[in-house]
Every structure is written in structure tokens, then in C-alpha cells.
């Protein structure tokens, strides 16, 4: 049952990305182009996501188990540390350069857009490099 719910959730998320236009890198780059033809629609998508996330975290924070019976695993760290800030900056830089983030990259991959392969390859390479560096630095 949980696999079916996961599939439906992923399809709903992907459908939301397609309907909102967030699978289109030009739309994302248009939002970041403040001096040119600025497209504010991404801000509306972000506000909608924040509202849904806020409500979900408020309701979920009061539960010990999920609706499927799994233990709730909500974040507990509330510190802004160097790792979070550097990771966020790298994510933002990559998003600004490519106009793609991980969710839309998978949607684009399903659409046959080759640009998503380059992005996903770079993302996986970055994850592997981070894992290697994290293991190396903790020794």
C-alpha cells in the first residue's frame, strides 16, 4: 500500500510541476531575470508550496505516526550551520545556472529532454563527491 501511495504522490508532484510550468527551465530563468523580462509566476508557486508545507508540518508535528502507520521523522536540527549554508548556496547557484532543480529534472528526463541528463549527471557526481569528502573530512 505504501508503494502505491508513494507512486501517487510522485505522480501528483510531477503533474504539479508540469501544470505550473516549473519543468520549463526558461520559466525558472525568467523568474531570476530581474533586470529583463521578469516572470513572477515562480513566486506564486513557491508561496503555494510554503502554505501547503506549513500546514502539513503543523499537522504532522502533532502526530507520532503517519497516515500509513510509519513513525514520523521530522527534522529536529534548527541550527544554521556552515554545511547548510554552503549546500544551499551551491543548490541556488546550480538552479540559477541551469534553471532546473532535482524534481523538474526528473520530469524533463521523462519528457526526453537531454539537458536533464547533463543536470542529473552533475547532481549525482556532486552527491558522490560530497559523500567522499564527508567521509574523508570525518577521519
Image: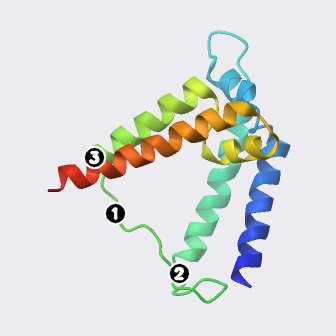
Q: Name the residue located 51 percent from the left edge and 76 percent from the top edge.
A: 61
* Quarter of the figure with residue 117: top right
How crowded pointer 2 is (Cα within 10 Å; few <14, some 14-19, many 20+) is rated as few
Horizontal side of residue 121 vs 105, given as left or right: left
Residue holding disc 3: 133
Proximity of marks 1 and 2: CB atoms separated by less than 8 Å: no
Number of residues whose C-alpha sits closer than 10 Å to that of mark 3, classed few (under 14), some (14–19) or many (20 or more): few
Instruction: Tell me where residue 128 appears, x and y as whole percent.
Output: 41, 48
Point out the residue furthest to the right here: 19
- Which residue occupies 56% across, 39% down? 121
Query: Compared with residue 39, is residue 56 higher up or lower down, i.e. above or below?
Result: below
Q: Give whichever of discs 3 and 1 has the lower sequence position.
A: 1
Q: Nearer the viewer, residue 48 or 3?
A: 3
Q: CA distance from mark 1 to mark 2?
A: 17 Å
Q: Position of residue 6 (x, y in %)?
A: 71, 71
Q: Indicate the position of residue 33 as horizontal and vertical percent values.
A: 64, 17
Q: Is residue 131 left or right of residue 25?
A: left
Q: What quarter of the picture does the C terminus occupy?
A: bottom left
| Residue matched to label 1 | 77
**Between 93 and 117, which is closer to the camera in this rendering?**
117
Which residue is the site of mark 2? 62
Amino acid at each position: 500500500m505504501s508503494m502505491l501511495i508513494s507512486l501517487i504522490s510522485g505522480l501528483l508532484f510531477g503533474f504539479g510541476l508540469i501544470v505550473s510550468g516549473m519543468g520549463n527551465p526558461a520559466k525558472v530563468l525568467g523568474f531570476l531575470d530581474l533586470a529583463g523580462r521578469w516572470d513572477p509566476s515562480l513566486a506564486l508557486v513557491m508561496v503555494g508550496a510554503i502554505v501547503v508545507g506549513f500546514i502539513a508540518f503543523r499537522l504532522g508535528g502533532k502526530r507520532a505516526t503517519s497516515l500509513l502507520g510509519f513513525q514520523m521523522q521530522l527534522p529536529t536540527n534548527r541550527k544554521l550551520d556552515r554545511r547548510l549554508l554552503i549546500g544551499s548556496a551551491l543548490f541556488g547557484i546550480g538552479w540559477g545556472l541551469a534553471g532546473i532543480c532535482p524534481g523538474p529534472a526528473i520530469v524533463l528526463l521523462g519528457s526526453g529532454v537531454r539537458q536533464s541528463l547533463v543536470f542529473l549527471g552533475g547532481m549525482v557526481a556532486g552527491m558522490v563527491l560530497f559523500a567522499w569528502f564527508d567521509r574523508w573530512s570525518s577521519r
